Amino acid sequence: MLRPAPAFSQETELRGEVSESAILADQQRKARQLRAQGSQGQNAPAAVAAQDTAPTTYQPASPGAVPDDDQAATADSIFDQPQATDASPADTTAPAKSRRPSTAKRRAQDAKAGTQDTKAGTKTADKKKAKKKPGAATDSTTTAATAATGNRNDDTATDETDTNRRAVTIDSVDRQKLDPGQERTGSIDGQKVKPEDDLFAAPGVRIGTFLFRPTLEQGFTATSNADASSTGKSAVLSETALRFTATSDWRENSALITGYGQFRNTVSGQKINDAQGRIEGQLNVDLDNELRAIAKLGYEAAPESASSPDAIAGVTSQPLRQTVDGSLGLEKTVGKMRYALTGAVSHDFYGDAELSNGTTVSQKDRDSTLYTATLRTGYQISPALTPFTEVEAGRRIYDLRVDTDGFERSSTRLGARAGLELDMGEKLSGEFSAGWLREAIDDSRLPAVAGPSINADLKWSPERGTTIGLTGKTNVETTTTAGQSGDILYSGRLTGERQIRANLTANTALGLDWRDYTGSDGHDMILSAEAGLTWWLNRYAGLTTRVRTEKLTSNLPGRDYTANSVYLGLKVQR
């Protein structure tokens, strides 16, 4: 009996075939036939002797096949039995071969050695099968071991070969898929680089963990009304403006610092020499449990406007107004509910007014501090829509409890609003709200300042390269004029920006301000319009120009004015 070569045994075990039991059953059947032939040999010694005269011939079914040791031992035991005495002395049998480990033991050793190469063997078998045509016989089929000895007839060998071939034939092995994320990707060099959205945007300068983007603008303005007042005259002014933004690149939290400064000096015409500016910082910190903290701090300095209700006539320069403000807010998300609590402080203090006769007028009775607390509750209908309600309570405290005219100007503030937050990405975002605002003054002789409250901050992009903005704000303006409480100022501004070309941008703006005086039927209306162009010579420098008109009409005497101006300048950014 022949057994398959070790290579065939190992390959079939790696493929997980189930034909071993069939092969063993066939071998047992052949052994029984050999025993039967041995019994017949004792009764017919002549026949056996005749068979022994011819040397036993081993015909392996495939290259490398070796005799099965168990079956070979059985055959040897049969042929080694005592023969008839009349057998020729010259008769000899085939020399006995050296014993080898049994087939079962050899298969166990091969299986142990082949366990480590299972994966490699499987992949090799998959590649071989993939190259073959459908229906082609596998290598294991063509090399199946067919045990045959010289004393077997051709029919027995053929039957065993067919049995082994049917047993070892297996289906093609499916290719194993790669683990998710292990697929091969293309070369980095071959990938397309995403173009920049704005080729003329400021690249910025990195300072520590912040990206700093400064802009310097220098130009000249020709105006018909230098100080925007009813007594203003024409002039040519030199204007210098410095603006900057600094954005953090932190992994989790974020910070933003913005600022600007503007300086005006007269080249010819009405004397103007003033400066104004503001700097503000914002810090966003993500806390645990869907809690977020937002802190703001700012400082602003600007001269009193000549068109302000509290403007002093006959001064060489209006008093400087300075403001320090800050706020701390906490935002909490619970399911679809949104909660926000914000506390804010704002302190205003004024410098002295210099009169044309060389004297000064103190403005300390106008210094005050406003404390407010605002609670907002919203419900997220969808990621794009979140309606909300808001209540506000506050207290305004003057540094001087009683002003120079004997009035107690401190007041209590209450307000309520309802609005809607929008978040549709770059298409439309922002919020707007409407409600009521009231500030009751401590002095009973002065009526409370109250009226509707409207606020908005929206951005809409109907198409790429076009941005339209709408802002609205409601402010309570206090006063120290005897017998007056103050007024409510409603400010609205509609802006538009269009990128005509990559290096050419157009912008427009329309403004409307409405001032409603408390305790009288007085009111002011201010209309303004502006249009401009910016042409970038390169990424760092560009030319800018704009035209502007502003008109104030009032039912109070001595307040109307009109101001037209044209500006041309050079802008440098980094």
Image (cartoon, rainbow, N blue to C red):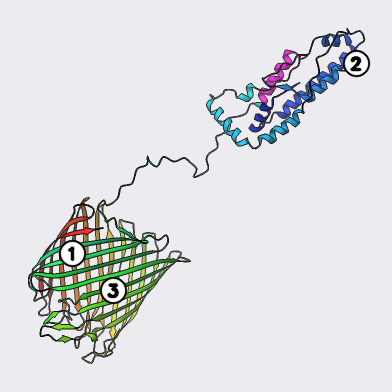
Q: Which sits earlier in the primary sequence, circle 1 or circle 2?
A: 2
Q: What residue type is labelled 3?
A: Tyr
Task: Relative to 511, say whether 398 is above or below.
Answer: below
Q: Nearer the viewer, residue 481 or 492?
A: 481
Residue 373 at x, y = what percent? Answer: 36, 77
Q: Is residue 448 above or below residue 156?
A: below
Q: Which mark is residue 82?
A: 2
From the image, tell me which residue sits under label 1: 510
Residue 536 horizontal/vertical position (percent): 19, 53
Crowding near pointer 3: few (<14 within 10 Å), some, many (20+)?
some
The earlier-in-sequence mark between 1 and 3 is: 3
Q: Distance between the residues labelled 1 and 2?
A: 126 Å
The residue at 77%/28% (across/down) is 102
Residues at marks 3 and 2, CA–CA distance in whole angstroms: 122 Å
- Residue 28: quadrant of the picture: top right
Up the image or down, 439 lies above or below 18; here it is below
SS at badge 3: strand
